[in-house]
Image: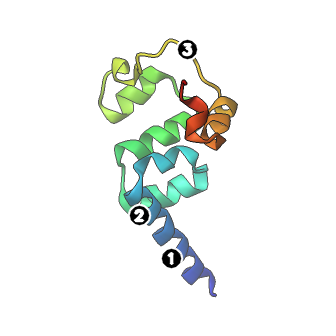
Amino acid sequence: MQDSQFENLKTYVLCERYNSDPSVVYSLNSDELQILLSALGELEPIVDAMNVLAGASVEQRARDIGCSPEDFDTGCDELISVEELTFAAEQPFHHFMRS
């Protein structure tokens, strides 16, 4: 496969993943986000994911996508680590059910 064909395929796959679930942007690296930005334009999830990757403050993220910092408030005061989310995702659903 030629380089240009590979790049076209990579762009296509990233766009399809984004169209299926825009939250995928938060798991992409900066190169992949740049590909999406070039292909799809400055969509809010892409811009926000780039800011998250760059370590931007909530205030900066809000300014860049035209919302309020309060819009990022999940209502949850407890922080959850990625390791906890990974563990939870790997557990069968009945593990969390109460008897």
Q: Which quarter shows the N terminus?
A: bottom right
Residue neighbourhood size for the residue with mark 2, other residues' Cα within 10 Å, grouped as few (<14), some (14–19), many (≥20): few
Inter-mark Cα distance, 3 to 2: 36 Å
Does label 3 or label 2 sit earlier along the sequence? 2
Left or right: 66 in relation to 87: left
Q: Amino acid at mark 2?
A: Ala
Q: Residue furthest top?
A: 77
Helix, strand or loop at disc 2? Answer: helix
Residue assigned mark 3: 78
Label 3: how many Cα within 10 Å (few below 14, some 14–19, many 20+): few
The residue carrying mark 1 is 8
Residue 75 in the image: above or below residue 61: above
Q: CA distance from mark 1 to mark 2?
A: 10 Å
- Residue 78 rendering spot, x and y as whole percentages: 55, 14
Task: Give whichever of 18, 55 is nearer the camera.
Answer: 18
The answer to which of marks 1 and 2 sits earlier in the sequence is: 1
Q: Secondary structure at mark 1?
A: helix
Q: Determine the residue positioned at 60% across, 40% down.
A: 89
> Which amino acid lies under the numbered mark 1 shown in the image of this protein?
Asn
In the picture provided, is 68 more to the left or to the right than 17?
left
Q: Which mark is residue 73?
A: none
Q: Nearer the viewer, mark 1 or mark 3?
A: 3
Q: Amino acid at mark 3?
A: Glu
Among all residues in the image, which is located at the extreme bottom? Answer: 1
Mark 1 or 3 closer to N-term? 1
Provide the residue designation for mark 2. 39
Dot 1 surroundings within 10 Å: few (below 14), some, or many (20 or more)? few
Q: Where residue 93 sits: x, y (%)?
A: 55, 39
- The residue depicted at 50 percent of the width and 61 percent of the height is 35
Q: Position of residue 69 (x, y in %)?
A: 37, 20
Figure quadrant of the C terminus? top right
